Image: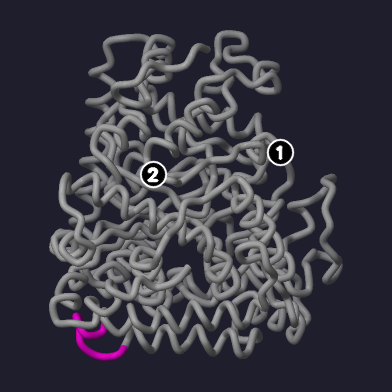
Amino acid sequence: MKPSSALYQALATDAGAAAVRGMRRGIEKESLRVAPDGALAQTPHPRALGSALTHPHITTDFSEAQLELITGVFDTTEACLEQLDEIHRFIYAVIGDEILWAASMPCVLRADAGIPIASFGSSNVGMAKTVYRRGLGHRYGRLMQTISGIHYNFSLPEDFWPWYAETTGRGGDNQALRTEAYFALIRNFRRHSWLLLYLFGASPAVCKSFLAGRDHDLESFDEGSLYLPYATSLRMGGLGYQSDAQSELQVSYNGLEEYALTLRDALTRSYPAYERIGLEVDGEFQQLSTSLLQIENEFYGTIRPKRSIRPGERPLHALGERGVEYVEVRCMDLDPFLPLGIDATSIRFLDAFLLHCLLSDSPPDSPEELLALRRNQSRIVNRGRQPGLELEDGGRLRARDDWAREILEACRKTAGALDAARGGSACSDAVTEQLARVADPGRTPSARILETMRSSGIPFFRFAMSASERHAEHFRARPLDAAVMASMEDACSASLRAQVEIEAADEVDFATYRRRYIDQELLPGRAPPAA
């Protein structure tokens, strides 16, 4: 992708800097709760953390032992990380001797049966969450679902859009303009997300217990670990949230309508392999539907268009009604060298990178390009730091390092505008740090993990366990002050009361609720396809 010269020239002005000053972000961080010996915790979600269904900042992902920590939306990096830090300190105040696993690839796991599926209570909406996860377990296995990561939510401020409309000469419906721009960002992000896997990938190795009895192409690092010498993010490859069934999907990002139409068939047409699982067995729902995708969130991509949803509303319906509100970046591993799993430098670079993706020319995608993107991702996941690696770009091969430097030099321009808006040089410094990682792959997290394991003579489990213990000590050594602690305890109590109210308000049985949810109109104004 090439920078749009008019947009970049306008961005360099005072008006351009003002337009991006209030850029907004939020973080969702997944972490496994583990026992002191590193085994997956078998305890239920602690009641002292409130209701996983209704708490705004602390919930669970797939497993009862897989916490998901959610910040609010902030216009400064510092405020976002401060809240994430406070959530960690609160959790450590109430989970006893358990700790949070510091790595994306999981701790010692024995079998699917030892991975408890998250419970969200007896309400219809809570049961739907549990049944969805039960379906994921049937379809992909529970082991795969314990892989954790960081999701980065990004949006432009209100003041950006009038500037963008004037600079591009586009009038008309403001929300339509935003949706079109976010889809342009997404197309470019998908073209260049390989760079994030190279720069921030932190899962080059796994514990052998994770792949016991499974076919794989990894090499033995030591008696307890498997790896690939130049791997960056095995989490984003065949070991992660992938499936042969989903590999058949060719989802277009050439605008909201094409995106929705290409997903709709997978959401509405029954899939034979999932029919064999059964929808309901012995009076218990096994999955939300027998379609290729139970719900939109089952489709895994490196980035998603997002819109806040109303109670009982499906994501595609929300997008169709009100357009794209923000994007969710989903390819960031937990960095085990960082207590929060991410730091300010990473966030500042993400901001510059995402703004570059939005402002650059973004031609339509094609089925051929989508296949090339998959091949690039596979190369980077498995061989990303290999000297001389080449990637596909528009039908030709390009040296990884040359292409990476080209992207990063373009990101300098957006970083400069962000620095002009905020003062200082923090964003530009973040880009400089990534250029150093291109020049020296040994500075990437994936290389540092393998070097630490090698120089210390420890397996992946011991490396990740030691990092987890250090982070636990880091948070426990800084207890929250009394006022903040009391406020967070109040939020937990309020969430428990809210769950009770939701459960009491149900007026139909779960079977009826599930049917109404699944039958919901996905594209407002368009009839659903025949089942």
Which secondary structure, mark 1? loop
Nearer-N-terminus badge (1/2): 1
Where residue 108 sits in the image (x, y, percent)?
70, 55
Which amino acid type is shown beneath numbered disc 1?
Asp
Q: Badge 1, how many Cα within 10 Å: few under 14, some, many 20+?
A: few
Region of the chain picked out in magenta, as a range: 419-425
In the image, residue 319 sits, relative to residue 157, either above or below, namely above
Judge the density around disc 2: few (<14), some (14-19), many (≥20) Cα neighbours within 10 Å. some
Secondary structure state at the residue bearing disc 2 = loop
Q: Residue at x 18, y 59 (%)?
A: 165
Q: Which residue is mark 2?
A: 255
The percent coordinates of residue 429 (x first, y second) are 38, 89
Q: Quadrant of residue 207?
A: bottom right
Tally of marks = 2
Residue at left offset 27%, top offset 29% = 311
Q: Nearer the viewer, residue 486 or 215?
A: 215
Q: How is the image coloured?
A: one colour
Q: Is residue 422 magenta?
A: yes
Mark pair 1, 2: CA separation: 26 Å
In the rendered view, would you say 112 is above or below 105?
A: above
Q: Position of residue 230 (x, y in %)?
A: 74, 74
| In this picture, residue 11 sits left or right of residue 373 | left
Q: Report the residue at 29% width, 22% height from top.
A: 525
Disc 1: which residue: 244
Which marked residue is nearer to the observer: mark 1 or mark 2? 2
Q: What percent of the width, then of the height, locates residue 497?
A: 22, 34
Q: Is residue 214 visible?
A: yes
Q: Is residue 78 magenta?
A: no
Find residue 522 and name its label.
none
What's under tag 2, amino acid-wise? Gly
Kindly tell me whether residue 476 is visible in this rendering.
no
The one of 266 and 67 positioned closer to us in this rendering: 266
